[in-house]
Amino acid sequence: MKGYYKEPKLTAEVLTEDGWFKTGDLGVLDKENNLFIKGRLKNMIVGASGENIYPEEIESVINNFRFVVESLVIQQKGKLVALVHLNMEEIEKKYQVIRQDMADLLEDKKQELLTELKEYVNSKVNKFSQINKVELQPVPFQKTATFKIKRFLYT
């Protein structure tokens, strides 16, 4: 693109001197010059020792876990916290019991799953990207028109 129409200041903010558009995406090139997107600059979390943590990488691991519909990794008080929305219908199907005992059993199973999820994720990510706590997100995350989670609402 050549720039924004009659907006030279805005154009200068989004284009480099040699004409490249600044998307805000962060990536790395491998030995074969393949580009891998790590995350977004505005989403990156700087760890206690200065390491760059990309929540999208952790979220992709979380979202591969059974019963997880969607997740969001944020920083709270210097610790990584995963907010997780579970597929409660699937959990209820898997652990069907007598109606009166169901509420207590489901609560126990949810806590077991969250603990199992934390152990699973921490075994798959590097040490500084390990999550400290997993919290249940009881309702789906609010999303934009393009179905992306509105991160700013949860930080």
Image (spheres, grey):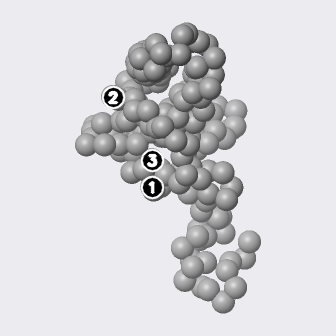
Residue 67 disc label: none
Q: Position of residue 16 (x, y in %)?
A: 59, 68
As displayed, is residue 17 above or below residue 140?
below
Secondary structure beneath dot 1 equals helix
Along the viewing direction, whichever of 97 and 139 lies nearer the viewer: 97
According to the image, label 3 marks what residue?
44
Q: Mark 1 or mark 3, which is nearer to you?
A: 1
Check disc 1: other Cα within 10 Å, few if <14, some if 14-19, many if 20+.
few
Counting residues from the N terminus, which is met first, the one under dot 2 or under dot 3?
3
Q: Position of residue 41 (x, y in %)?
A: 49, 53
Residue 124 visible in image:
yes
Along the viewing direction, whichever of 77 and 134 lies nearer the viewer: 134
- The amino acid type of the residue labelled 1 equals Leu
Instruction: Give how far apart the Cα atoms at labels 2 and 3 are.
Output: 17 Å
Secondary structure beneath dot 3 equals loop
- The amino acid type of the residue labelled 3 equals Met
Q: Residue at x 67, y 59 (%)?
A: 145
Q: Residue at x 59, y 53 (%)?
A: 143
As displayed, is residue 68 above or below residue 73?
above
Residue 132 disc label: 2
Along the viewing direction, whichever of 65 and 39 lies nearer the viewer: 65
Check disc 3: other Cα within 10 Å, few if <14, some if 14-19, many if 20+.
some
| Mark 2 and mark 3 residues within 8 Å of each other at the beta carbon | no
Counting residues from the N terminus, which is met first, the one under dot 2 or under dot 1?
2
Q: Position of residue 120 (x, y in %)?
A: 48, 17
- The amino acid type of the residue labelled 2 equals Asn
According to the image, label 1 marks what residue?
153
Q: Residue at x 46, y 37 (%)?
A: 137
Q: Seen from this angle, which residue lies furthest bottom?
A: 6
Residue 66 visible in image:
no
Q: Residue at x 62, y 26 (%)?
A: 89
